[in-house]
Image (cartoon, rainbow, N blue to C red):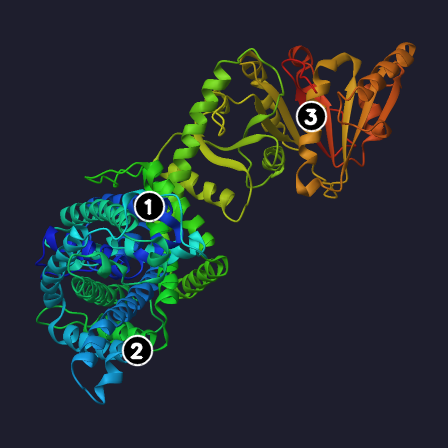
């Protein structure tokens, strides 16, 4: 993996992670919007929002803790975790979206701070005659821009160290505010409380959820400090999980206190309703201001570090931009230029933004990030990667739940914006991948998962098939083919891939005669690459080095199918002009026959018909046992796209004196549906003893692209090579011997 994000001046422990996280969770939304949420959806609706929000954030927190304890987490927080698991390209695409959400979060919290300041401004206007300043103190946009300016100057000049120190003060004020709120007296009697009702003209549940969800995103606050932590593998899991669980508990208690303290309509229409309930009202605006500033501080600390990490991975179009954004102060490693960019974005959003709309944007981008983190954790559980050894382990089903919920909620919150977010992510990925060729970890993660799934399926199928050894129901070919002429004759490979395309499973073995040595091993790898390269087939390809064809065949028949079941069909091949290979095939037929394999022998012709218009199948009364398997193989081959314009023609040969009897039987067989052949493609031929069957076949199938002919195993011992000779007028022939008659239903 390219480019490590290294920082040698790490100073913080677990507490800043907890403080940063809890201060964001118990932040501006709790004080400014949560009462409105409870009023609009009711108590149980608020509980549903809390549960649903944490059903996303808790799996994410656990996933973050897991991934953080497996890898050496450097600066960049969420981005580092994602990119080092998914690869730079996909990680950077998510990282850019994450940075934007973090930068926009700064403006969101500043806008919230401005709203919290208005009651104080009104108080000052009433108490004192401030003249020209009076309008300024009650103008939320003006207050927001001024606050943003002061925050920018503070963070640029003092950096994260001051921000972390300020978090301790802020957190203290927040907890004092909450304490005074809980100590406040109820404005209604308990008998008036209805936990199931909600305010009049209540807003949609998912609209309210979208606005509230940023309150639950505090896990990113702690993770964003990863580059400044002494031991991120310990501090991140501890601080994040504690903050998340404690935050959920406090939100439930606040919802209960709100419902038992005031009317739901008052909740829905009074954004500072907590101030009316608290034992000392001014503490709530103060707590809100502190919460907003703390969250803004957290975001403005995190966002530049995400941007810096992106730049260190060189994902931007220009190396000059990468260098400029990656630049940091020598004395404290602060990402100065990244901070400037963050502040500019935040200034713009403060100027044009509305707090509810900004909250919706933040929610969407965080959903993308959280979904990605949970998906990574889920995939890592199934990848079987030995390098994935986290000290803390979540559960795969928890991570899967988080990923599914994140995607579902994106579309429930705003379908159009969800699609837009996905398009933006794809666009980011496209342009990043154009510059970078790094796809290793992204590909490998999915490859490892697929390998594990395949392994489990093979084991399962093996057990199922072992318990049904005697069953011959719904036969399908599990074919293994062996040839030493793979580079000069493609016929065996072609048959294997045709069979394996849709209905069957195929393994193709290239045989190399000789003993295993460095030279033959290297040769085998070259040939294997040649056979695989550029070929999109469903055939598993391998090579085998063995001193003789017989020993090679003995090894091949013992191979398991790629499906996890035992192979049931072996495919051999020879050329009509290569008698030596023909003799090798025939000398080993008895070996195959004793193993219980069905046997198919491909004879490739020196003149090929590549039209792929007709497959001829020849059935005779002498080898009726082969008929069903021959028809099935023809039907299976016909399923390949290369044969989509072809048709099967079945020719049956019967004794002249019994022709009518066999004819009626055959057509009854077809009409009953046992043969997937149209009657018009059936041709009945009476056999006159004066004419050989081979001559009949030569006369009728000279123009066939592939001819399938059955043969009896016992005749091989008697007639040997003669059984396969005499078809001089035919092109490619597939000789078939079925160990038992197959069912066609």
Q: In the image shown, does 164 or 622 lie closer to the viewer?
A: 164
Q: In the image shown, does 510 or 239 lie closer to the viewer?
A: 239
User: Between marks 3 and 2, how big is the CA–CA gap?
Assistant: 77 Å
Tell which circle, 1 or 2, labels the residue nearer the N-terminal end. Answer: 2
- Whether pointer 1 and pointer 3 mark residues with C-beta atoms closer than 8 Å, the reply is no
User: Between marks 1 and 3, how big is the CA–CA gap?
Assistant: 76 Å
Q: In the image shown, does 484 or 219 lie closer to the viewer?
A: 219
Q: Is residue 614 above or below residue 53?
A: above
- Residue underneath mark 2: 141
Q: For mark 3, does the 10 Å Cα neighbourhood hold few (<14), some (14 to 19), or many (20 or more) residues?
A: some
- Measured from the top left, where is residue 640 in percent x and y? 66, 39
- Measured from the top left, where is residue 631 in percent x and y? 72, 25
Q: For mark 2, does the 10 Å Cα neighbourhood hold few (<14), some (14 to 19), or many (20 or more) residues?
A: many
- Residue underneath mark 1: 192
- Residue underneath mark 3: 632
What element does badge 1 sit on? helix
User: Between marks 1 and 2, how big is the CA–CA gap?
Assistant: 39 Å
- Measured from the top left, where is residue 156 in percent x and y? 16, 75
Q: Quadrant of residue 139?
A: bottom left
**Can residue 338 be seen from the camera position used here?**
no
- Measured from the top left, where is residue 684 in percent x and y? 87, 22
Image quadrant where one finds the N terminus: bottom left
Tell which circle, 3 or 2, labels the residue nearer the N-terminal end. Answer: 2
């Amino acid at each position: 993996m390219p480019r490590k994000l290294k920082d040698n001046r790490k100073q913080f422990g677990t507490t800043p992670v907890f403080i940063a996280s809890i201060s964001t969770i118990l932040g501006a939304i709790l004080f400014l919007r949560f009462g409105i949420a409870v009023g609009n959806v009711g108590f149980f609706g608020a509980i549903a929002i809390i549960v649903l929000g944490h059903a996303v954030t808790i799996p994410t927190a656990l996933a973050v803790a897991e991934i953080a304890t497996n890898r050496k987490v450097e600066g960049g927080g969420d981005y580092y975790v994602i990119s080092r698991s998914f690869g730079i390209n996909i990680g950077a695409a998510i990282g850019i979206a994450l940075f934007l959400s973090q930068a926009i979060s700064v403006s969101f919290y500043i806008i919230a701070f401005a709203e919290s300041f208005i009651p104080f401004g009104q108080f000052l206007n009433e108490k004192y005659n401030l003249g020209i300043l009076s309008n300024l103190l009650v103008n939320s946009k003006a207050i927001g821009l001024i606050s943003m300016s002061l925050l920018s100057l503070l963070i640029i000049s003092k950096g994260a160290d001051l921000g972390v120190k300020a978090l301790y003060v802020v957190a203290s004020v927040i907890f004092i505010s909450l304490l005074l709120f809980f100590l406040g007296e109820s404005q209604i009697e308990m008998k008036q409380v209805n936990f199931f009702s909600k305010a009049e003209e209540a807003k949609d549940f998912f609209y309210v959820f979208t606005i509230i969800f940023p309150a639950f995103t505090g896990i990113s606050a702690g993770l964003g400090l990863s580059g400044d932590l002494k031991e991120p593998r310990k501090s991140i899991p501890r601080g994040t999980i504690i903050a998340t669980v404690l935050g959920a508990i406090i939100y439930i208690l606040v919802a209960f206190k709100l419902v038992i303290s005031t009317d739901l309509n008052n909740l829905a229409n009074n954004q500072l309703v907590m101030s009316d309930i608290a034992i000392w009202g001014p503490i709530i605006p103060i707590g809100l201001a502190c919460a907003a500033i703390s969250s803004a501080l957290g975001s403005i600390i995190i966002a530049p570090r995400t941007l810096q990490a992106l730049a260190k991975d060189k994902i931007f179009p220009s190396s000059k931009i990468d260098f400029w954004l990656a630049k940091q102060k020598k004395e404290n490693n602060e990402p100065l230029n990244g901070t400037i960019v963050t502040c500019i974005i935040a200034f713009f959003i403060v100027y044009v933004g509305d707090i509810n709309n900004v909250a919706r944007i933040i929610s969407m981008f965080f959903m993308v990030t959280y979904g990605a983190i949970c998906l990574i954790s889920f995939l890592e559980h199934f990848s079987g990667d030995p390098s994935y050894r986290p000290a803390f382990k979540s559960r795969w089903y928890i991570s899967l739940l988080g990923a599914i919920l994140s995607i579902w909620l994106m579309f429930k919150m705003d379908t159009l914006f969800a699609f837009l977010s996905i398009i933006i992510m794809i666009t980011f990925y496209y342009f990043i991948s154009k510059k970078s060729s790094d796809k290793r970890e992204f590909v490998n993660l999915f490859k490892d998962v697929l390998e594990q799934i395949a392994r489990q399926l093979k084991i399962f199928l093996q057990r199922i098939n072992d318990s049904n050894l005697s069953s011959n129901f719904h036969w399908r070919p599990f074919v293994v083919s062996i040839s030493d002429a793979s580079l000069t004759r493609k016929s065996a490979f072609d048959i294997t891939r045709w069979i394996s395309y849709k209905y069957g499973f195929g393994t193709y073995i290239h045989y190399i005669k000789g003993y295993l040595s460095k030279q033959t091993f290297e040769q085998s790898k070259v040939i294997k690459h040649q056979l695989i390269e550029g070929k999109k087939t469903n055939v598993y390809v391998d090579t085998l080095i063995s001193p003789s064809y017989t020993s090679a065949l003995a090894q091949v028949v013992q191979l398991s199918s790629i499906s996890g079941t035992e192979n049931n069909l072996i495919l051999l091949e020879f050329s009509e002009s290569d008698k030596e290979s023909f003799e090798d095939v025939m000398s080993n037929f008895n070996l195959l026959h004793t193993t219980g394999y069905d046997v198919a022998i491909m004879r490739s012709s020196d003149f090929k018909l590549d039209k792929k218009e007709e497959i001829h199948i020849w059935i005779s009364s002498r080898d009726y046992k082969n008929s069903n398997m021959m028809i099935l193989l023809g039907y299976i081959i016909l399923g390949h796209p290369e044969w989509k314009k072809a048709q099967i023609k079945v020719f049956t040969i019967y004794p002249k004196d019994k022709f009518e009897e066999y004819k009626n039987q055959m057509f009854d067989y077809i009409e009953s549906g046992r043969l997937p052949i149209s009657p018009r493609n059936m041709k009945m031929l009476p056999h006159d003893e004066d004419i050989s069957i081979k001559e009949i076949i030569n006369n009728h199938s000279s123009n066939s692209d592939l001819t399938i002919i059955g043969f009896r195993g016992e005749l091989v011992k008697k007639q040997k090579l003669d059984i396969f000779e005499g078809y001089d007028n035919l092109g490619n022939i597939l000789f078939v011997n079925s160990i038992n008659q197959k069912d066609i239903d």
